[in-house]
Image (cartoon, rainbow, N blue to C red):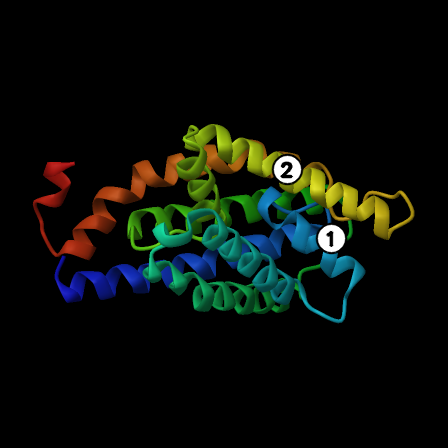
């Protein structure tokens, strides 16, 4: 790849982080639970509110990056350390998104449910852009990939297991912190787990060819895919 194309791909990845973060903010605003991978940070932000959700997401992502280093050891590629500043960006974008959606009145359950759906669509759009950018994985996906490679297991199966473990961990932390009450993990988390992959696939099918054409500057891309 030429330097110009690489620059375009990283710019696209940063844009994808923004949309993903705003998607998380929408689902958080609905208070019906966030996506599985953000559920642990969400519970921690409910208990230790001195730090924002974005700050807890930064910490959570850094823990996942550390997990990759421990699992992969010498196989860990230094380029993956870019996940650290990108995790900070994602956290800051999330807090900005929280500010944006704070003006939206969320008074009824149907509105809350609509916020979850909107959040899933925006999040999925962001994830789709990050996949098309194809420069670096977010820390959650990279952690799953590290487990998959280390233990020679199917990525998809590990991804499902990881999402389930995130939700279980969030529920356990909630029970501990809030006197055996589940906080921050509700039906929105389940809806997100069920729909996000489907919507990401939809966006990938619609966006991959035209976006790749812009990234490569090659009008023949659409014909070669």
Q: Please name the residue shown 38% across and 46% down the image.
A: 128
Task: Label 1: state its secondary structure.
Answer: helix
* Residue at image coords 73%, 50%: 31
Q: Residue at x 47, y 51 (%)?
A: 68
Residue 165 numbered mark, or none: 2
Q: Mark 1, residues whose alpha carbon is within 10 Å: few (<14), some, or many (≥20)?
A: many
The first of marks 1 and 2 along the sequence is 1
Instruction: State the image quarter where residue 180 is shown.
Output: top right
> Is 80 placed left or right of 90 in the picture?
left
Which residue appears farthest toward the front when viewing the image?
A: 74
Q: Quadrant of the N terminus?
A: bottom left
Callout in the foreground (1, 2): 2
Residue nearest the observer in this picture, 169 or 68: 68
Query: Residue 110: image x %, image y %?
Result: 71, 41
In the image, residue 202 sits, relative to residue 31, either above or below, namely above
Where residue 72 appears, x then y in whole percent? 42, 48
C-beta proximity under 8 Å, tags 1 and 2:
no
Left/right placement of residue 222 relative to residue 202 reads: left
Q: As drawn, is 8 to the left or to the right of 187?
A: left
Q: Nearer the viewer, residue 154 or 170?
A: 154
- 82, above or below 207, in the image: below
Quarter-wise, where is residue 35 in the image? top right
For marks 1 and 2, give the CA distance. Answer: 14 Å
Q: Position of residue 162 (x, y in %)?
A: 56, 37
Q: Which mark is residue 43?
A: 1
Tell me the element at label 2. helix
How far from the left and from the top, in percent, is residue 178? 87, 51
């Amino acid at each position: 790849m030429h330097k110009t194309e690489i620059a375009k791909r990283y710019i696209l990845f940063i844009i994808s982080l923004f949309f993903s973060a705003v998607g998380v903010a929408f689902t958080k605003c609905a208070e019906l639970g966030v996506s599985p991978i953000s559920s642990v940070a969400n519970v921690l932000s409910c208990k230790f509110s001195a730090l924002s959700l974005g700050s807890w997401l930064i910490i959570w992502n850094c823990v996942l990056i550390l997990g990759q280093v421990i699992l992969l050891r010498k196989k860990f590629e230094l380029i993956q350390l870019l996940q650290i500043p990108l995790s900070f960006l994602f956290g800051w974008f999330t807090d900005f998104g929280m500010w944006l959606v704070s003006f939206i009145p969320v008074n009824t359950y149907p509105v809350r449910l609509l916020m979850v759906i909107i959040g899933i669509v925006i999040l999925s759009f962001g994830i789709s852009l990050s996949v098309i950018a194809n420069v670096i994985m977010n820390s959650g996906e990279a952690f799953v990939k590290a487990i998959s490679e280390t233990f020679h297991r199917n990525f998809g199966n590990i991804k499902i297991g990881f999402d389930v473990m995130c939700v279980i961990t969030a529920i356990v932390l909630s029970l501990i912190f809030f006197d055996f009450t589940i906080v921050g993990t509700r039906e929105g988390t389940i809806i997100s787990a069920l729909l996000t992959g489907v919507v990401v696939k939809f966006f990938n099918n619609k966006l991959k060819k035209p976006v790749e054409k812009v990234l490569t500057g090659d009008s023949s891309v659409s014909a070669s895919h």
